[in-house]
Image (spheres, rainbow, N blue to C red):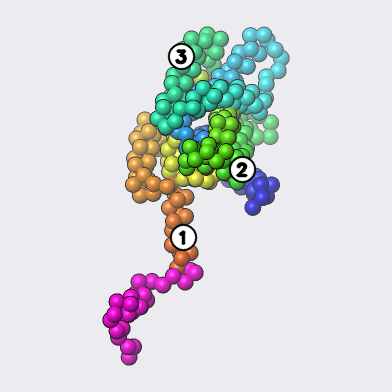
C-alpha cells in the first residue's frame, strides 16, 4: 500500500475513533484517550531509534519534558510581556519538536559513538541533567512548577479536552505514517543493518553515524511534539511529573509488547497497555500502573519475546506452510516408515 493511500485510511480510522468518542457522551473518554494517544506517539518515536536501529533510549522523559517546557516558556513570555494573542497549540508543537529535535541531534552526536548499555546510561544521564536545569530555571517555574491557564471550551468542539484529544490523534497518525515511511525506505534498511551488525554495516559502506543522527533527531522531535500540549492538558506542570520514570518505562515496554520490528507494534502495545493502565487508574489506583507494566512485560518476554506482531507472524507462517501443502505428521508416518525399511500396512 502506498503512503498516500495509507494516510487516507489512517485519517478515516482516526475520524471514526473521534466520532465514537463523541458518541459515548462522556468527556472522560477524551481525557483518558489523550494519554493513550500520547503513548502511541512516544512509543512510535522510541521505536525509530530503539526498534529500527537497536539503540535503547532511556531519555524519553527528557525529550517529552523539553516539548512541555518549551510551551511553558512561550506561555510565560507572552504573559510577562502582556501580548494580546496566545500561540496556537499546533505552533507550540512545532516549536517543541524543533527544540527537542535539535537537542536530540546534539545528544546523538555526543553519545552515538557509545554502544549498548553505555549509550543507554548516557541518555539516562541526559534526563537527569535536563531535570536539574529545569528545577533551577525560575522563568518556567523551577521546582515550584508553573500554572498554564487554558480555555474551558472551544468553538465547534465544546470542552477543550476534546480539542487536545483531536490534536494528539492527528499527531499519532502523523507519527505512524512517518514510522511506516522510514521502515520501507533506504533509511529504514540502513537502520536495520545497524541493528543486525553495525560493524558489518560500516564495512559495507553504510553511513552509520549519519543514519543514527537522523533517527535520533526524528525520535526526539516527535517526543517533543507529544509533550508540547501537555501543560494545557494538565494545567499545572512541575518537574517531577514531567520527567517521571513512567514515560521512559512505558515508551520502552509498549513497543516490546507490540513488536519492535514494524510500525504497528508500538501502536498495538500502546493501545493495549495504555487502555489497561487507564482502567486500573479508575478502578484501583494509578500507583499500580508500573506494576502492571512489569507483569505484562515479563509475561510477554516469556510467551512472545518478539511481541504480539512476532507471535502473529509466526502463527501465520505455520498456517501458510499448511496451506501450501505441508503434510501433517499423521500423513507422513507411512512414508517415514517406508524410508526406515518397514512396509506400511496396506489399506483395507
Check disc 3 and report its element: helix, strand or loop.
helix
Judging by the rendered image, the residue that carries numbered circle 3 is 132
The quadrant holding residue 273 is: top left
SS category of the residue bearing label 2: helix
Q: Which residue range is magenta in the image?
A: 323-348
Name the residue at 42% across, 38% down: 253
Residue 162, image x, y percentages: 60, 34
- First reached walking from the N terminus: tag 1 or tag 3: 3
Q: Is residue 223 left or right of residue 259?
A: right
Which one is in front in this view, the residue at disc 1 or the one at disc 3? 1
Label 1: which residue? Answer: 317
- Tell me how far mark 3 sits from mark 2, CA to CA: 39 Å
Residue occupied by mark 2: 186
Frontmost residue, 227 versus 341: 341
**Residue sitting nearer the eye, 336 or 204:** 204
Q: In front here: 162 or 336?
A: 336
Evaluate whether residue 13 shows in this view.
yes
Q: Is residue 126 above or below residue 178?
A: above
Q: Mark 3 and mark 1 in contact (Cβ < 8 Å)?
A: no
Q: Is residue 342 magenta?
A: yes
Category of crowding for the residue at label 1, using alpha-carbon neighbours closer than 10 angstroms: few (below 14), some (14–19), many (at least 20): few
Residue 203: horizontal and vertical position, in percent?
52, 38
Q: Residue at x 39, y 46 (%)?
A: 305
Find residue 230 and name its label.
none
Q: CA distance from mark 1 to mark 2?
A: 26 Å
Task: Name the residue furthest front.
Answer: 203
What's the CA distance linking mark 1 and mark 3? 50 Å
Tell whether 333 sits left or right of 169. Answer: left
Amino acid at each position: 500500500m502506498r503512503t498516500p493511500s495509507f494516510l487516507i485510511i489512517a485519517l478515516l480510522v482516526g475520524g471514526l475513533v473521534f466520532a465514537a468518542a463523541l458518541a459515548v457522551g462522556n468527556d472522560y473518554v477524551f481525557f483518558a484517550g489523550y494519554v493513550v494517544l500520547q503513548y502511541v506517539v512516544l512509543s512510535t518515536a522510541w521505536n525509530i531509534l530503539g526498534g529500527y536501529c537497536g539503540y535503547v533510549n532511556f531519555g524519553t522523559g527528557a525529550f517529552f519534558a523539553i516539548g512541555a517546557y518549551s510551551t511553558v516558556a512561550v506561555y510565560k513570555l507572552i504573559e510577562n510581556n502582556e501580548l494580546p494573542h496566545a500561540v496556537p497549540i499546533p505552533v507550540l508543537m512545532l516549536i517543541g519538536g524543533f527544540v527537542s529535535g535539535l537537542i536530540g541531534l546534539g545528544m546523538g552526536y555526543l553519545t552515538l559513538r557509545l554502544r549498548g548499555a553505555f549509550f543507554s546510561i548516557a541518555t539516562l544521564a541526559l534526563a537527569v541533567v535536563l531535570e536539574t536545569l529545569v528545577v533551577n530555571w525560575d522563568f518556567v517555574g523551577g521546582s515550584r512548577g508553573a500554572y498554564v491557564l487554558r480555555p474551558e471550551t472551544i468553538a465547534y468542539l465544546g470542552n477543550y479536552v476534546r480539542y487536545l484529544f483531536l490534536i494528539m490523534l492527528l499527531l499519532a497518525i502523523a507519527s505512524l505514517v512517518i514510522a511506516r515511511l522510514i521502515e520501507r525506505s533506504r533509511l529504514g534498511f540502513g537502520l536495520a543493518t545497524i541493528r543486525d551488525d553495525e560493524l558489518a554495516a560500516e564495512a559495507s559502506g553504510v553511513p552509520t553515524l549519519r543514519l543514527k543522527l537522523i533517527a535520533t533527531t526524528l525520535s526526539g522531535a516527535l517526543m517533543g511534539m507529544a509533550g508540547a500540549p501537555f501543560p494545557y492538558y494538565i494545567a499545572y506542570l512541575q518537574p517531577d511529573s514531567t520527567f517521571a520514570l513512567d514515560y521512559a518505562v512505558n515508551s520502552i515496554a509498549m513497543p516490546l509488547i507490540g513488536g519492535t520490528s514494524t510500525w504497528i507494534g508500538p501502536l498495538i502495545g500502546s493501545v493495549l497497555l495504555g487502555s489497561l493502565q487507564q482502567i486500573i487508574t479508575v478502578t484501583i489506583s494509578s500507583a499500580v500502573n508500573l506494576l502492571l507494566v512489569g507483569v505484562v512485560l515479563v509475561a510477554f518476554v516469556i510467551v512472545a519475546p518478539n511481541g504480539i506482531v512476532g507471535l502473529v507472524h509466526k502463527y501465520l507462517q505455520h498456517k501458510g506452510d499448511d496451506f501450501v501443502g505441508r503434510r501433517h505428521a499423521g500423513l507422513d508416518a507411512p512414508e517415514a516408515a517406508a524410508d526406515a525399511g518397514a512396509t506400511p500396512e496396506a489399506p483395507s
